[in-house]
Amino acid sequence: MMMRGKDNPEVAKRVLDSSKSKMNKYTHDQYQNELIDIMAHHVLRAKVSKIIDSPFYGIMADEYTDVSNKEQLSFCLRWVDRLKLNIHEDFLGFYEVANTKSETIVQALKDILTRFNLHISKCRGQTYDGASNMMGRKSGVATK
């Protein structure tokens, strides 16, 4: 906001006025995190709106344990735009999962697709790592 204030005197005045209060509206970490979340959601919505218009897409997912020992699922989509038929790969986020069992991961993938309003009927491919919970012939994520 300080940088934006260099271009806009009204913004600069408000930032300086608010910096005198203990919990100012523009520079407190709570508000900055909220602004970052809003911008991230805006970027995701813009990406997903293009993917929704695509004739088809493929899922790329992988599970892992992060440094704090939480199970995470990384989620990407590979899709083709309608006009130029260019291939795109977009990372859409890390999602925490309770465990790495195939049922949990399948439910998380369904939840992600539902949240983004992506129809499974347009899914033409799946890419997972070679772990048995992902690629297992009987009960892996790919099968389910």
Image: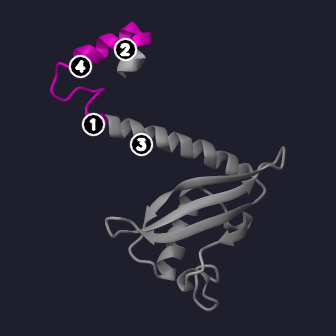
Instruction: Report the residue marked by disc 1.
Output: 29
The disc placed on residue 18 is 4
Q: Amino acid at mark 2?
A: Val
Query: From the viewer's perspective, is 117 left or right of 12?
Result: right
- The residue drawn where x is 23% and y is 14% is 17
Q: Residues within 10 Å of mark 4 (few under 14, many from 20)?
A: some
- The residue drawn where x is 65% and y is 46% is 49
Which tag is nearer the camera, tag 1 or tag 4? 1
Q: Amino acid at mark 3?
A: Asp
Secondary-structure class at tag 1: helix
Instruction: Report the residue marked by disc 2.
Output: 11
Instruction: Report the residue marked by disc 3.
Output: 37
Q: Residue 79: percent from the left, percent from the top?
A: 72, 56
> Magenta span has 28?
yes
Which mark sits nearer the N-terminus, 1 or 4? 4
Q: Amino acid at mark 1?
A: Asp
Quarter of the image with the N terminus in it: top left
Front in this rendered view, residue 114 or 11: 11
Front in this rendered view, residue 98 or 133: 133
Q: Amino acid at mark 4?
A: Ser
Secondary-structure class at tag 4: helix
Which mark sits nearer the N-terminus, 1 or 2? 2
